[in-house]
Image (cartoon, helix red, strand yellow):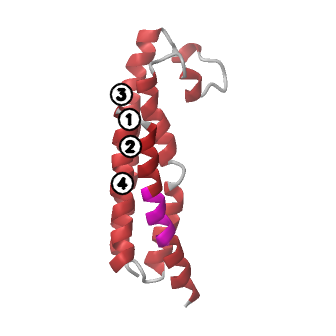
């Protein structure tokens, strides 16, 4: 098993938790400032209920955290497949690191500037890395 490829996955997990803390650290003060009160939230309330209640720039961190719970789940599965198949080295390892670095840049961009044109290009770049890794994972399991 090639466990080196698990390191970028672990970094992305840690980054996701950092984004969670960043989101909470900006969202709770903004909620307090807006008068929103968690103790009076109706049953089933969700973070998306804060759209239009707190500033958009605060919500951007939440949007990004949600994104980190979406496509990266495919990344984690792909990394595990590559590691188990003994293909977690070379180009796959470089692609895994590229994916994580681009996703971190994407997070910072979305949480601060959020110009969609740039954010979309970062998403496409990370998706290309993941696509190549997924194809390589399939090949590694067919052998």
Gap in angstroms between the C-alphas marked 2 and 4: 9 Å
Where is residue 105 shown, x and y percent of the image? 33, 47
Question: What number is the disc on residue 25?
Answer: 3
Location of residue 99 with respect to 84 vertically, above or below: above
Gap in angstroms between the C-alphas marked 1 and 3: 13 Å
Gap in angstroms between the C-alphas marked 2 and 1: 6 Å
Q: Is residue 129 left or right of residue 143?
A: left
Main SS class of the magenta portion in the image = helix
Where is residue 110 shown, x and y percent of the image? 40, 38
Q: Which residue is mark 4?
A: 102
Secondary structure of the residue carrying numbered label 1: helix
Location of residue 26 with respect to 107 vertically, above or below: above
Task: Identify the image quadrant of the N terminus.
Answer: bottom left
Magenta span: 125-133
Q: Which residue is mark 2?
A: 107
Crowding around mark 1 (Cα neighbors within 10 Å: few <14, some 14 to 19, many 20+) is many
Q: Are marks 2 and 1 in contact (CB under 8 Å)?
A: yes
Which of pointers 1 and 4 lies earlier in the amino acid sequence?
Answer: 4
Where is residue 28 shown, x and y percent of the image? 41, 21
Which of pointers 2 and 4 lies earlier in the amino acid sequence?
Answer: 4
Q: Are marks 3 and 2 in contact (CB under 8 Å)?
A: no
Which of pointers 3 and 4 lies earlier in the amino acid sequence?
Answer: 3
Location of residue 111 with respect to 70 vertically, above or below: above
Looking at the image, the residue that sits furthest to the front is: 117
Q: Which residue is mark 1?
A: 111
Which of pointers 3 and 2 lies earlier in the amino acid sequence?
Answer: 3
């Amino acid at each position: 098993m090639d466990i080196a490829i698990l390191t970028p996955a672990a970094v992305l997990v840690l980054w996701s938790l950092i984004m969670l803390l960043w989101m909470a650290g900006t969202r709770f003060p903004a909620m307090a400032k807006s008068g929103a009160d968690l103790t009076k939230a109706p049953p089933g309330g969700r973070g998306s209920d804060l759209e239009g209640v707190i500033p958009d720039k605060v919500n951007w961190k939440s949007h990004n955290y949600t994104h980190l719970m979406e496509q990266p789940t495919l990344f984690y599965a792909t990394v595990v497949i590559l590691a188990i198949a003994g293909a977690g080295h070379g180009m796959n390892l470089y692609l895994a690191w590229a994916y994580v670095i681009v996703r971190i840049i994407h997070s910072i961009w979305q949480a601060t500037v959020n110009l969609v044109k740039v954010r979309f290009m970062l998403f496409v770049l990370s998706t290309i890395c993941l696509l190549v890794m997924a194809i390589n994972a399939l090949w590694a399991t067919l052998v």
